[in-house]
Image (cartoon, rainbow, N blue to C red):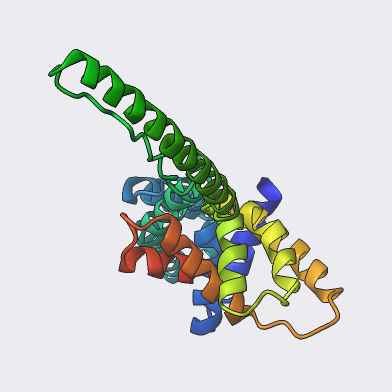
Amino acid sequence: MAIRFMNGLNSIIFAASNPTALRTQVETLGFQHLDLEVTVPRVVIFRDAIVDLFDMEMGARFTSKAKQGFMAILNYVGGAYIYIRREYADRIKIINSSWRIANNKAADFMDTPEGEGEEGEGGEGEEGKEGGDAGKDAAEAAATEVGGNARASGDAKASGEAKNANNMKVPTTFNEMFMFNGAVMGFGGSTWMNLILDQFDAIVMNVANSYRLQEECDVLSLVLAKYKGTINLSEFKAVMLASLRSLVPKDWDSNYEVAWGWLWE
């Protein structure tokens, strides 16, 4: 931890003369501190501790200009950490919550219509018992024949519908929906998407842990480097967003679109 701290501080100091490089370095470190609650009082404590350490170690060589310079750059770094956490913490929450919804839904199937065809209810008035009994016997015979045909037809229909229902299982997880949308959008032959799909869960679950996220991205890069063929990452993004919209329809809005686009970019 001490070495990591010194490397971070050293990189900030060396980039101080180059605004673009300094901003990039500070943003990188800011994302690495997303899991920590950085506040103004804590930034002040940290800044004063660093300045006091330099003052104690360097004595008179640590001039007032040097002190002001260190305080300015540490204030900038602390403010950037607070800004990054404030602006991007909501995006991380959106990504985490929508990912849980997209992968923990209960399995739903297409509603299968229940058997219809219970016919042959007959109840006739009891007028003329002899004629009524004869009519009842005839009606029962006819109802039996009609009911048998209806049941046979109903069984065949139910069997066919059940078979179709099994074939039309609704995708309920991200991977299932991704494969479905990929085929519909014409990317069924892009086998490289499966390579990203295998690593995608680990990437999303570690979005707030920059070190682990970098490792997962490095692993994915090595896997894709072995693929022989054309890779168009924008195609994966299109299928990814389409799948998430389908799985999180109630909550999905422009904030979700921005958050997931930010993660992918």
How far from the left and from the top, in percent, is residue 60? Answer: 52, 60
Q: Quick check: can you spot residue 13?
A: no
The front one of 58 and 207 is: 207
- The quadrant of the picture occupied by the C terminus is bottom right
Q: Quick check: can you spot residue 20?
A: yes
How far from the left and from the top, in percent, is residue 131? Answer: 22, 21
How far from the left and from the top, in percent, is residue 70? Answer: 46, 65
| Residue in the image at 60% along x and 71% along y | 182
Which residue is farthest front?
130
| Residue in the image at 40% along x and 46% along y | 45
| Residue in the image at 39% along x and 34% along y | 142
The front one of 175 and 33 is: 175
Q: In the rendered picture of this protein, how many numbered marks are placed on residues? A: 0
Q: Quadrant of residue 139?
A: top left
The front one of 195 and 61 is: 195
How far from the left and from the top, in percent, is residue 109? Answer: 49, 46
The answer to whether 48 appears left or right of 22 in the picture is left
129 above or below 169? Answer: above
The front one of 55 and 152 is: 152
- The quadrant of the picture occupied by the N terminus is top right
Q: Quadrant of residue 140?
A: top left
254 above or below 113? Answer: below
